[in-house]
Amino acid sequence: MIDLSVRIGGLQLANPILTASGTFGYGSKFADFMDLNQLGGIVTKTITLESRPGNPAPRICETPAGMLNSIGLPNLGVARFIEEKWPFLSTLRTAVIVNVAGRSMDDFVAAIEALEPVAGIAAYELNYSCPNVKEGGLAFSSEAQVAAKLTRKIRGVTRRPLIAKLTPNVARIGEIGRACEASGADAVSAINTLVGMAVDIRTRKPRLATVTGGLSGPAIRPVALAKVYELVQTLSIPVIGIGGIATATDALEFIIAGAAAVQIGTAGFMNPCAAAEVVKGLEAYCHQERVESLAELRGSLRL
């Protein structure tokens, strides 16, 4: 048997393959395509204290080797998430990580406090880095002091593992990561989308109602890999890689560069089974290379 397990703070995962928030809904719709328990974990759609309608349409468009989105974090709000979505999620054996966002620090804290009584939540991913909301948005992960203050506030109301999700749209992502680590984060996940834009040359209008949006998909993978490597070299806590990962080969690049785990996002729009296929691909690679434990590969980059 190949040991694909990984430990992230107090969170034990059967394997390092997670789904990325905002690309997998609340998991139930993907259950028709795969056994969700094959995955290391599921990261839910972002939850906020109150419900949100999201941004106006059009809010998604295809780009070369990727896609732009400006969804705006539409969700049911914490109360309805607990009532309507958690009953299904609670039946899964795989780890369920709830992604949380807020318009303000108080909103973040209140959302976490509302989720605390819910049994079975494996960890919280803190969405500090969405470029598509007017309130808060990138400020939470573009200013080290702000990221540190918010992480400390959240750490004060929960003992569950905290994963700070960071933006690439900064000069030094390592500085933000250090601030989160020093303030109680158990891990960081990176990267969220790059800010991008597309124009319809016939109408001369932006393809997104909000003009700019978040670029994801294979086009951003080299940027994501570089940012993850920077964080790995800077931090002592685990780093979860995100950005254009669609295959086991992609995932292995991040793991060899030092990532503890990875998240599959945009690939799921093209292939709903992508995350499960990456797990199988990792197992196949380890068999071929006679690797007994994925830990042997993590951070094994040869310089």
Image (cartoon, rainbow, N blue to C red):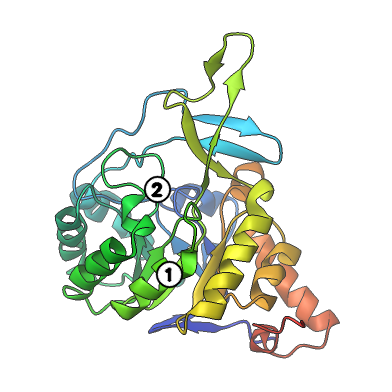
Task: Give SS at disc 2.
Answer: loop
* Res. 70 image quadrant: top left
Q: Quadrant of the C terminus?
A: bottom right
Q: Mark 2 vs mark 1: which is more N-terminal?
A: 2
In front here: 298 or 86? 298
* Residue 68 visible in the displayed image: yes
Q: Quadrant of the N terminus?
A: bottom right
In the rendered structure, find residue 130 and report the number of the disc placed on it: 2
Query: Which residue extends farthest top?
Result: 203
Amino acid identity at mark 1:
Glu
Direction from residue 292 to residue 154 in the image, left or right: left
In front here: 251 or 238? 238
* Res. 277 image quadrant: bottom right
Residue 174 percent across, percent down from the top left: 47, 70
Amino acid identity at mark 2:
Cys
* Residue 245 visible in the displayed image: no
Residue 181 percent across, percent down from the top left: 36, 77
In the rendered structure, find residue 175 and report the number of the disc placed on it: 1
Residue 68 percent across, percent down from the top left: 55, 36
